[in-house]
Image (spheres, rainbow, N blue to C red):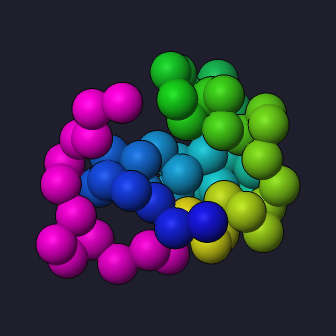
Amino acid sequence: MPAKSAAQQKAAGAALSAKRGDAPKSALKGASKHMEESMTEKELDEMASTKRKGKPEHVKD
């Protein structure tokens, strides 16, 4: 599933980094912490690799 906003894409990148062990899990907060716990590495990679061009910074639900 591709990211719908730049903020979502950045959070997925942070969660992916922690899941791979490149960054400490204790540094995560908010959405990235939840993403790291609930998504697989493949799902995070797919969301983090979404192109940011043309994406809004935030999307209202």
Towards the viewer: 20 or 13? 13
Residue 13 visible within the image? yes
Locate residue 15 relative to residue 52 in the image: left or right.
right
Residue 11 image point, x, y percent: 46, 44
Does 49 sit above or below residue 12?
below
Q: How many marks?
A: 0
Q: Residue reaching furthest front?
A: 61
Residue 17 at x, y = what percent?
Answer: 62, 55
Residue shown at 35% from the left, 78% from the top: 51
Magenta part of the chain: 48-61
In the figure, residue 40 lies in which quadrant? Answer: bottom right
Give the prevailing secondary structure in the magenta stretch: loop
9 lies left or right of 29: left
Work out whether 34 lies above or below 53: above
Q: Is residue 22 visible?
A: no
**Could you tell me which residue is drawn at 51 percent across and 57 percent down?**
13
> Could you tell me which quadrant the C terminus lies in?
top left
The residue that appears at 61% across and 66% down in the rendered structure is 1
Q: Nearer the viewer, residue 38 or 19?
A: 38
Q: On screen, 19 above or below 46?
A: above
Please determine whether, in this image, residue 59 is positioned above or below residue 3. Answer: above
Which of 28/39 is in front? 39
Q: In the shown orientation, is residue 32 left or right of residue 40?
A: left
Q: x%, y% of residue 39?
A: 78, 47
In x, y percent, where is residue 60? 27, 32
